[in-house]
Image: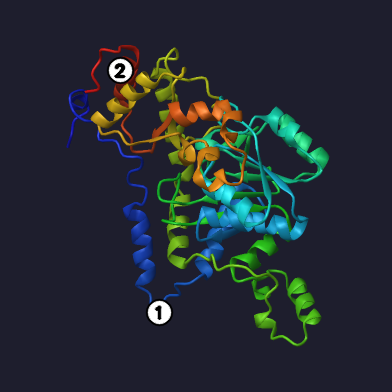
Amino acid sequence: MQSESSLLLTDLDWPLMQNNITRQDLDAVIAYLRQEDPPLTQSANVRAFEREWTQWLGVKYSVFLSAGSSANLLTLAALKALHGGGEVIVPPLTWVSDIAAVLHCGFDPVFVDIDPRTLGMDTEEVIRRLSPRTRAVFLTHILGYNALTDRLVQELAARRIPLIEDVCESHGATFQGAKLGTFGWASNFSFYYAHHMSTIEGGMVCTNDEEVYETVRMLRSHGMVRELDSPIRRGAYADANPDLNPDFIFAYPAWNVRSTEINAIIGRSQLKRLDDNNARRTENLRLFLNNLDPKLYQTDFLIEGSSNYAFTLILRTADPERCRRVMDCLKAHRVEFRRGTSGGGNQLRQPYLRHRLPLEEWAKYPRVDHVHFYGFYIGNYPSLSQTKIVRLCELLNRVASDPSCKAA
């Protein structure tokens, strides 16, 4: 085994994620599979995972799906079904599936620039872009940072505009003592392998609104009415459609984005240690930011209530040569990273949006464009050595401040 002191002389060997599916999780799956003819498609464990997640988060309802992108899609589809079309305000720094869901469901995306201290949407810009056509504000909590403000929450409530929270990278983060994902009309979570907890692939839609919950349940499974929890709602559809078999009434032209018992079993196992893992992640983040040189890198993030997904490394100034040296350093020491932070940086520069927006629309959003070119994220996870964290900060500070310094 490599000693802590030897890290000073060797590669850091630092992947984005490590050991996120444990032996304990796999043993839970194996024990289930040893039963005689265990159900594998959506069944009792999916229901149990939904109940346990609902209790952990602090909402009334949760629906387990095949992926976080499925959660995005179904939330926007429910918004369209219940509130009609129009505009949805979205961030330019997010995962592609957020914007894709807006487009797939026929909404017009309205972009606003970011707040550099949270990487989420700038509250004042969001409020300026609200209009009679605004159907929702779709806010992403980036890399574990809270992007909510009192002003935003109160303004949206006063105007009765739904807030949708993308919490895919921020499991367990809080705002004013309550978990992110409990403030919106609906919220979305991802359980992809590299996130705070994993079901290999998986996602969750959470809400306190029964109508949203029941709509998403139908949308998850072909639009079938039999997926409704409420017998009164099921009965109403049956009464209105006497020519149809009550087991095969399709209320929406929907999808099949159900998950499985296997995924739910892993999720139930992982949920038991999520809070402890998040505490370690937060400790790691503080160590990382406290050891970076604030003259070279942004370190003044608003970290109160954060539940860090990955370390945020953003150069203070736009310096292409310094940026190259930082990347060379990371590569030389085998530290895996992603340039542009979440989702590959400024979504407005991506090909799928170019034909939908005016030429060089991206130029109107300078703060996210700085992150696009001079921002990175680096893996953070509970098993990460704190000696490695300090050592990496030393390397990054040296290589960024001294042009003659070699990456290795």
Residue 216 location, x and y as percent?
Answer: 65, 62
Point 48% across, 72% down: residue: 41
Quarter of the figure that contains the C terminus: top left
Whether the residues at callouts 2 and 1 have beta carbons within 8 Å, the answer is no
Q: Residue at x 48, y 20 (%)?
A: 299
Residue type indicated by callout 1: Asp
Nearer to the camera, 290 or 54: 290
Query: Element at badge 1?
Result: loop
Image check: 98 left or right of 266? right
In the displayed structure, 314 sits above or below 159; it is above
Where residue 220 appears, as percent x and y from the top left, is 59, 65
| Residue type of the residue flagged with mark 2 | Val
According to the picture, the residue beneath numbered tag 2 turns out to be 399
Residue that carries the numbered disc 1 in the rendered image: 37
Mark nearer the N terminus (2 vs 1): 1
SS type, badge 2: helix
Residue 74, which numbered label?
Answer: none
Residue 54: tell me if it is visible.
no
Direction from residue 388 to residue 350 in the image, left or right: right
Can residue 369 be seen here? The reply is yes
Residue at the image position 35 percent from the left and 40 percent from the top: 16
340 vs 67: above or below? above
